[in-house]
Amino acid sequence: MAKLTVRDLDVRGKRVFVRVDYNVPMEEKDGQMVVTDATRIVETIPTLKLLISKGARIILAAHLGRPKGKREPTMSLRPVGLKLHELLGEPVEFADDCIGVSAGKIASALKDGQVALLENARYYKEEEANDPAFAEKLAQFADVYVNDAFGAAHRAHASTEGAARVVAKRGGKCAAGLLMERELKFLGDELENPARPFVVILGGAKVSDKIKVIDRLLEKANTILIGGAMAYTFKLAHGEKVGKSLVEPEHRQTALDAEAKAGKLGVNFQLPADIVVATAVDTGKLNKKGKPVFDYANIQTMKGDIPDDAEGFGIGDETARQYAKILAGAKTILWNGPLGMFEDARFAGGTNIVARAVADATQNSGAKSIIGGGDSVKAINKAKLGDKVTFMSTGGGASLEFLEGGVLPGVAALMDK
Ligand code: ADP
Ligand code: MG
């Protein structure tokens, strides 16, 4: 059933606790922390504008980084408050504690249509522990609970779950924000009864990350197109050689089971025909994180057994064009997982051809295209096609769990319409 949303609420004069995802990248500049990418803040503006126009008294809660229960000054949300003020064009009060006197003072002084932001909820270890007493304190002043942080909804924390329960127990409404509403619509409702053909593109590094998603989507899709390092475990399961490619030998049976299930259900299950391989060469250098930096030699596209010293890094052009042809006839497209190591331009070719095909199907034949997964979204953005697809999830790990058919605690805590 559809969840109650901010559109359905009568909030004039009410204190509305809104959980947002303001876990934004920051950088130190001249001794101050500044927001380097405000996308997540921008994305909450429609929900905030709607609540302001309805006369709500808005109390925003969020987390930043992993301060592990300590007041870590570099992880303060104060700079986020400044950025929000700039983007919203309205004053934003800042409470330098998410509970207690400071939060209470600011929350009780709010007038209709005013906004306050609470300091990082993860300054308290009780946040991630979903401690009931802490949730009680967080929601102390809230008449209504709204969650617009889909990316944090797969965690049962005090601000994503506990606080909603507190408000509900008191007879208050618990609803989805507009951003959350869109995520539930596209990753949920739209895929329940998709327009057909429904084509799923699955890539990424590991079969083990995607077993549940593959299993669930096999029951819904007409076609599944496989790419990424995941494809090599399938190859290995067929008795082919994979050289030094990233594989999970322990998941060979999982791969065979998926193909068998596809056969039984009549799903067109496609594996890459050609692969871009290379030989990794240790440069002897270390990156910022202290990990060895590799360069790649002998880059070539090939079929069949991968040589012993080579490693697969993406789908070849023939595969990409074959996938593009299938996508041209699709009416619904779901994409999770890049089809190669797209971060390196030399291995992004296949992913980019497929990204272009998804954009074309969306623009030219009215297909609905839905992109889930943090790296998949990065790949589409890198190909500059973000505005040519129907929907890109903001959820990262949460979108994968949702696509698996899992119940996200932050979603379960919201009321049905
Ligand atoms: P998402 O975040 O969209 O769910 P994943 O996290 O599952 O996607 O996978 C993305 C990662 O998989 C990327 O960092 C990419 O470099 C890696 N990857 C894809 N194909 C390969 C490959 N052939 N070899 C090594 N890594 C790969
Ligand atoms: Mg990822």
Image (cartoon, rainbow, N blue to C red):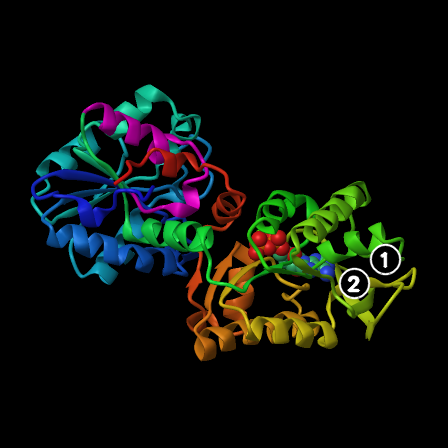
For residue 116, side relative to residue 385 (left or right): left
Residue range corresponding to the magenta coloring: 147-170
Residue 88 in view of the camera = yes
Task: Read off the residue under disc 1.
Answer: 242
Between 85 and 7, the one lying in front of the other is 7
Whether ligand 1 has any atom under 8 Å from the Cβ at mark 2 is answered as yes
Tag 1 secondary structure: loop
Judge: label 1 CB < 8 Å from ligand 1. Answer: no
Q: Quadrant of residue 17?
A: top left
Specify the quadrant of the image occupied by residue 74: top left
Hey, which quadrant is residue 110 in on the image? top left
> Closer to the N terminus: mark 1 or mark 2?
1
Residue at 29% in and 38% down: 416
Q: Which residue is mark 2?
A: 312
CA separation in Å, label 1 and label 2: 8 Å
Position of 223 relative to 409 (above/below): below
Residue farthest toward the top in the current orientation of the protein:
133
